[in-house]
Amino acid sequence: MDIKKLNQIYEGKAKKVYATDSPDYYIVEYKDDATAFNGLKHGTITGKGIINNKMSNLMFQLLAKNGVKTHFVEQINDRETIVKAVKIVPLEIIIRNVAAGSFSKRYGVEEGRELLAPTLEFSLKDDALNDPLINDSHIIALGVATENELEQIRTLAYKVNEVLKNFFAGLGVKLIDFKIEAGRLPNGEIILADEISPDTCRFWDAKTNEKLDKDRFRRDMGGVEEAYQEIFSRINNA
Ligand code: TMP
């Protein structure tokens, strides 16, 4: 696709977004920067941007094959991808299959406990407020999304979970939980945006429960780059 990169319009903790010479497309660039705890902890995970770019694109293509509409258009190089221009709905959309992280802390549940059903929760994407949990009625009352959009988001999130959970099970990996983001197309349709990577998912080896995701960085466990490599190589050998 013949698209020219123009000015940077956004810089997040892990990616930059550029305008292009078409109003319908952006270019995202994945960085090696890593943060945790709303930016309190900073670091670099060498090669992460390349893995997250390629892995996200593979996940978006897998999801598209399974009927999920995503922002993915075309990978340009190791770190850059053309995506559909969307307005991000400012919500972190989190699905959990197994208790871990903030869920375990909040409800006093040991990490690793299988949940009886997948859970869906939302956080408001607002760094100044520390991404607070937000419920459906708050989302509608504040105009963050409409009821119709929320319904599309719920359907999207559970579908993504089914597809990814099965895919990773085939690689000997448990999908513990993940965060996705949704975007609005100009026609109002909600599609999957952002990324799907070890930054945004928890992956545990099915046999050993070894963590193969960003928790190794968050918790200073070491072997961070190796964990990203391990997940990526299992996907590539699938
Ligand atoms: P949590 O247990 O810390 O709430 O995280 C749930 C999932 O969401 C986990 O897979 C990591 C992911 N996540 C993000 O992608 N970005 C974030 O800012 C946070 C807090 C979690």
Image (cartoon, rainbow, N blue to C red):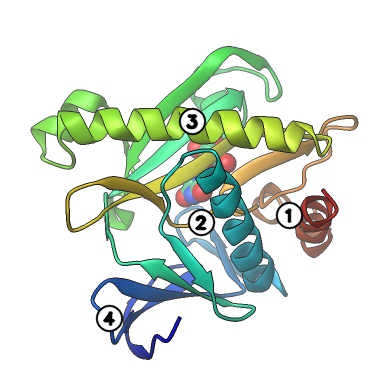
Callout 2 touching callout 1 (CB < 8 Å): no
Secondary structure beneath dot 3 equals helix
How many residues crowd mark 4 within 10 Å: few (<14), some (14–19), many (20+)? few
Q: Residue furthest top?
A: 116
How many residues crowd mark 3 within 10 Å: few (<14), some (14–19), many (20+)? some
> Residue at left 30%, top 33%?
152
What whole-number distance in Å separates the C-alpha atoms at marks 4 and 1? 42 Å
Residue occupied by mark 2: 195
Counting residues from the start of the chain, the first of labels 3 and 1 encountered is 3
> Residue at left 9%, top 31%?
141
Residue occupied by mark 4: 22
What whole-number distance in Å separates the C-alpha atoms at marks 2 and 4? 22 Å
Callout 2 touching callout 3 (CB < 8 Å): no
Answer whether residue 222 is visible to the viewer in this image.
no
Residue occupied by mark 1: 220
Counting residues from the start of the chain, the first of labels 2 and 3 encountered is 3
Residue occupied by mark 3: 159
Callout 4 touching callout 1 (CB < 8 Å): no
Which quarter of the figure has residue 135?
A: top left
Quick one: quadrant of the N terminus? bottom left
**168 in relation to 35, above or below:** above
Which quarter of the figure has residue 143?
A: top left
Position of residue 177 measured from the top left corner of the image (x, y, whole percent): 59, 34
What whole-number distance in Å separates the C-alpha atoms at marks 4 and 3? 30 Å
